[in-house]
Amino acid sequence: VLGQGQSFILRTTNGGTSWAPVTAPAGAKGLNGVHFPDAMTGYAVGGSLFGTDPTILKTVDGGATWSALSTTAKGALAGIHCSSASTCIAVGGNLSTMTALILKTTDGGATWTTFTPPADTTNFLMGVHCVSPSVCHAAGTYSNVSVVLRTTDGGGAWNKVFHTSTTIGSMKGVQFLDPNIGYAVGVTRVEKTTNGAARNRHGPVDFFSMRGRRVSGTK
């Protein structure tokens, strides 16, 4: 469990019955997202929205201790997903430049490569989920319109596969149960795809509105 502002981390070892605080490294800011690809290895991300260095933390002991990782990118990170202990994609953005931020590591966070989404597709990305090392989806906003992006080459190239036709706010998260079935959650709606959102079409074609329904999954 992460916290924003004065960053804090909570850890449970008994299924959530009790929680204990864990010390975050000095300088960690605005933690927003966390993912554990295995029981021992985990990553947490955050940072300032207006151009300072992103926060990237890593643990190799199940969250008992955390260390800070470095990158030259500027902005904040809001979500991260790892297909293995060494390969992760993190997303966010820089509100000073109104540009989305996509980072990838393949060496356990030692180095991070920056990828740029297509122009006029997104200002800020809030969540990312990789159903395989090569296929990932990221959710966010562009001019207050919800968007979902997709990559099929592990993050090198991204295409917009969904956006709303009205200004309903940002998509906050995305998750796929398998390569075809996925959900994107926004401020006022939940969208679903049953074909991997493969087509680049305007409006809720591949994703269709599940507004007002409860969504649950196993992953």
Image (cartoon, rainbow, N blue to C red):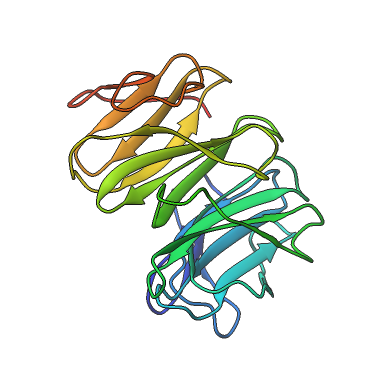
Q: Residue at 54% x, 63% y: name it.
A: 45
Pick the front one: 87 or 68? 87
Q: How many marks?
A: 0
Q: Residue at 72% x, 53% y: name it.
A: 41
Pick the front one: 13 or 116? 116
Residue 53 at x, y percent in the picture: 55, 78
Extreme-right residue of the structure: 107
Pick the front one: 95 or 43? 95
Reply above or below: 111 against 125. Answer: below
Residue 117 at x, y percent in the picture: 53, 50
- Whether residue 51 appears in this view of the structure is yes
Q: Residue at 54% x, 47% y: name it.
A: 14
- Whether residue 12 appears in this view of the structure is no
Is residue 6 shown left or right of residue 23?
A: left
Is residue 23 shown left or right of residue 182?
A: right
Extreme-bottom residue of the structure: 26
